[in-house]
Amino acid sequence: MGGLPLMRVFSLLIVGLCGLLLMLTPAAGQGQEQPLVVFVEERELQMASVTDSGIDGLTRLAQTFTDLGARTRFVRLRDPLPDETQVIVLVRPRRRLPEAFLARIWKQVEQGANLLLALDPPGHVGTNTETVGSGLDTLMTLDYGIGLQDGFVATTSFTTLTAQDLVTSFLRVSPEINNHPVIEPLITYDVPLQVWGARHLRVEPFGPDTTAFPLLFAEPVFAENDNIFRNQNPLPLELNIGSDDQGRLIIGALGENERTGTRLALLADGEMVQNAYGFGRIPASVTPEHPGNVVFAQRLAAWLLELPQSAWPELLPRFTWLRLDGLDDDWNPALQPTLNPASDASILALSLQQVRAFRNEDFLYLLIDTATSPNPNVQVVFGFDSRGAGAADTIVVANRDRIYIQPEAGAQISIPDAAFVIADSIELRLPLRVTGISSRIPSLCLNSARELAFPTPPDCIESVAVTSIGENDPAAIRFESDLLVTVISTSRINLRNGPGTNFGVITTIPNGRVFAAVGRDAAGEWIQVQNARYQGWIASFLLAPNGDLQSLPVATE
């Protein structure tokens, strides 16, 4: 009879040791008013610390649990964990867990504790952590249907140098469409998260006692499995067809075990919950730089504490949370519409009745009502005062197929982060870098994007009022872009309207702000960047890119 695989034998030994510890340990305390969340801290594991309030610390994650009514404390794994522990948090250990440490964790899991693990990829920034087939990986797979993969997740824009630096190894990830309550608002409002040097995971949705859910994914990416991090002769970072996983890779997952009644949250990156990374703030404010990360962490903490959803935290204040679904049920009823008393369109579905419009710090939102449900082929033509000169200077055309700028001459210019939805009303989102920040839209017209058997003239309103609400958008970058840059400076820097110091300043940008890089000058000394609010130029030495800036196309002014 064949022997058991070595890792299976190891996992059985760990479970057996857990059982022995359970027999030798008194039952968990009862009647605790506040659940206890323990943050594991061991120097030899070189892990993120809850007692560190600096950039690598976990004090903001701990505060998230405290705000939900929990007690938090740090613990060593050299001693048994407190019996009343409800959640164990272990973030970014750079060394593999010794067997005794793993046994103490799993003993508490068998006793009913939930677990939050955030594990970086092997080799990244000197990490020598858990790998496929390790004891922790085997136990997570057996008990929760979630396991590790060892590759480093990268885009085709990454280079070996940018991958090796924590600051430049970042990329955006998205919520999976699976309706799990932890990520429900991120799906509803189309909000990404950011990670810094991630691995990927494997998920088996159903097992004998387990149910697992993928939460976050990156796409299109690949997982570099070659040793690109070794000190001597590192291998190049490149996609190797056949050996590197590619496409849609899972970055975060949840698992539940019916036998123990416990929960596991496994994140494939540690920085996404650290103070100055996932929990980073815009300088001189308390506004999160990455609201998707903060909302995700808050809801993840509530899920691990097993709170009813009615007790989960509200969405972050000072951000615009608006579903783009063509309905008005989440619009502020106090927002006054601009009426069109002169509407005389012969087709009711193209008859413009009223428009409501507001802008936050990043986007313009509009809700347009017609006399009946809008025609599916309705088209909106805007004349925007983008320069604030008091007259329309930019024509934007929007329909369900595409949204673009119509220049006076030349090709149409697509607006990839705009959105157009039709249901009971027409709902739109347009970036302010296109529309400008004027308090009025000079002209707005409805017509048909398809040729009609009996054509009718456009139905128009002149001068639509736009209300400024002074909020940020939860996603200032809403289009696919492999090459991202982070502003790195001790003071605010200039965003200019051309590639050189002789060009005018559009605005100043604080440290840590992320942009999509869309072009460069011929020398590569100036980079054209873009988000919803701005498009302009920044000197390349002030930027930390996650890839090769020289791969960008040379852009005109």
Image (cartoon, grey):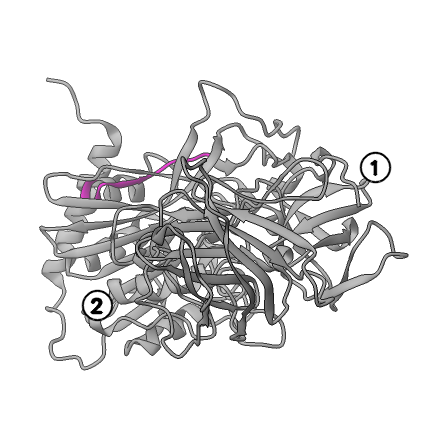
Q: Nearer the viewer, residue 240 or 319?
A: 319
Dot 2 amino acid type: Gln
Q: Nearer the viewer, residue 210 or 14?
A: 210
> For the residue carrying disc 2, how many other residues have a C-alpha within 10 Å: few (<14), some (14-19), or many (20+)?
few
Dot 1 amino acid type: Ala
Q: Position of residue 172 (x, y in %)?
A: 50, 48
Q: Position of residue 134 (x, y in %)?
A: 33, 38
Give left or right: position of 84 versus 387: left
Of circles 1 and 2, the one toward us is 1
User: What kind of element bears circle 1?
Assistant: loop
Q: Residue at x 80, y 46 (%)?
A: 557
- Range of magenta residues: 142-151
* Quadrant hosting residue 297: bottom left
Disc marking residue 384: none
Give above or below for 471 relative to 402. Answer: below
Q: Check disc 2 and report the residue beneath it.
A: 309
Give above or below for 478 relative to 449. Answer: below
Give left or right: position of 543 versus 464: right
Q: Nearer the viewer, residue 288 or 36?
A: 288
* Quadrant hosting residue 310: bottom left
User: Can you see residue 448?
Assistant: yes
Give above or below for 280 relative to 479. Answer: below
Which residue occupies the extreme right position in the image? 502
Q: Residue at x 18, y 51 (%)?
A: 256
Q: Check disc 1 and report the residue beneath it.
A: 522
As for residue 134 lying within the magenta part, the answer is no
User: Can you see residue 40?
Assistant: no
Quadrant for the N terminus in the image: top left
Per the model, the C-alpha gap separating discs 1 and 2 is 54 Å
